[in-house]
Amino acid sequence: MIADFIVYNIKSLYHSREIPPVKGNKMKMIETLEQPFIAIKDGKVLHVGVADYSALVGDKTLLFDAKQKVVVPGFIDSHSHLVHAGSRENEFEQLRQGVPYLDILQAGGGILGTVDKTRKASFDELYAQAKKSLDVMLSYGVTTLEAKSGYGLNYENEVKQLEVMKKLNDNHPVHLVPTYMAAHAVPKEFLNNKRGYIDAMLADLEKIRATNLTEFVDVFCETGVFDLNETREILEAAKALGFKVKLHADEIDPLGGAGLGADLGATSVDHLMAIKDEDIIKLAKTSTILNILPGTSFYLNKTYARARDMIEAGCALSVSGDYNPGSCPTENFQLIMQLAANYLKLTPEEILTAVTQNAAFHLGLASQKGSLEPGKDADFLLLDIPNLAYLFYHFGINHVSHVFINGQQIQ
Ligand code: NIG
Ligand code: FE
């Protein structure tokens, strides 16, 4: 078979070839190839090898000299709130003085402040702001991004967010995976009528299904937002309509959302700073991914999820950015990975598995993305680093020199 494109003169290539969900000890199993090449055909990986590649070269094959850069699969950031209007630097000082995140929300700020701005924003304004952030994420090596609605909190404005994601997906090289998250907060017009809001959302779920704009539904299961029973009701209704479900679970208070996610067969349970021990044990027996967001702990000055305990119990973890205006305002995914090393005490190998194979798995992309095996999308990065550990050691800067998506050089 003749390749369209071959990247050669690579120093090392690192990826996980474990079958996801990659659990516990297997998360540290990374294949390292020295002086390999990567051959691409029709946007997919044709072959990765260390021998002579001349048999794959035809008249039209393009060759790219990697100049001894390191190759890894493109990073998959599997939890973000990409599409929103404005910013919330006005809350920065309150948070620093110790005002709890949930108190700011109860007072009508926080998520609800961003809802006001997002409802007022036009489609084009939302698109422009999200595109600008997505460009930055791409420059830091994100080639696939999950993105949630949840700042519209009514049908019209939730769909506006999802339509922005669709247009970005059609026009931007980063692959977007949209999630419907009207259960992100109770909007002001339903403040004393949460039941009315849940009923409205349940009715909207059917219409959202018909739009084909998303396959996923997420709920913020937290004190003062949606309790365990409400979360179960919304997610069971979503499942009955054929959606895959996930939760913001046990972020601040230990309500048991992680255990509920295990019971419901959630694709992921996210945050988990306050997860109960029994739910770690329960999740280890499932295919639900524990999605850890260390940037949120860092920005909110909170504790970090007990990632080592989770790995020891045999769970499968992903790590993601949670980019949003209120609890993690950064698009720098390499910084998120470095926080995972420093504060979650994950090893470079575990983090690489977390942001590739396991993230691909819970987004339903395991057969297409997450490793550089033949037949998968040729999404990969050239990093200007001597080895994998250096990516975490030399922190706060951007190590990406080139990004390839579907075998095309994007930058
Ligand atoms: O994942 N926890 C809830 N939602 C987001 C924050 C959204 C916001 O503050 O605007 C999160 O941290
Ligand atoms: Fe979130």
Image: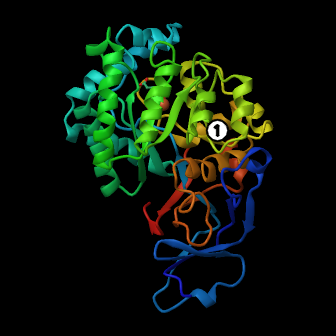
365 vs 256, nearest the viewer: 256
Q: Is residue 258 visible?
A: yes
Residue of label 1: 338
Residue drawn at x 68%, y 58% is: 19
Of the residues shown, which amino acid type is indicated by label 1? Gln
Residue drawn at x 70%, y 48% is: 390
The image quadrant that residue 15 belongs to is: bottom right
Residue 237 falls left or right of residue 196: right
Helix, strand or loop at mark 1: helix
82 vs 219, nearest the viewer: 219
Q: Quadrant of the N terminus?
A: bottom right
The image quadrant that residue 205 belongs to is: top left
**Measured along the vertical axis of the image, is residue 60 above or below residue 134?**
below
Count of numbered marks: 1
- In the rendered image, residue 298, in percent from the top left (x then y), is placed at 59, 25
**Measured along the vertical axis of the image, is residue 23 above or below residue 270?**
below
Residue drawn at x 73%, y 25% is: 278
- In the rendered image, residue 253, in percent from the top left (x then y), is placed at 59, 15
- Dot 1, crowdedness within 10 Å: few (<14), some or many (≥20)? many
23 vs 235, nearest the viewer: 235
Q: Is residue 329 visible?
A: no
The image quadrant that residue 187 belongs to is: top left
Residue 379 falls left or right of residue 72: left
- In the rendered image, residue 334, in percent from the top left (x then y), is placed at 57, 43
Residue 99 falls left or right of residue 108: right
Residue drawn at x 31%, y 57% is: 170
**Measured along the vertical axis of the image, is residue 132 above or below residue 309?**
below
Residue that sits furthest to the bottom in the current view: 59
Confirm or reject: label 1 Cβ below 8 Å from ligand 1: no
Q: Quadrant of the C terminus?
A: bottom left
Residue 22 falls left or right of residue 244: right
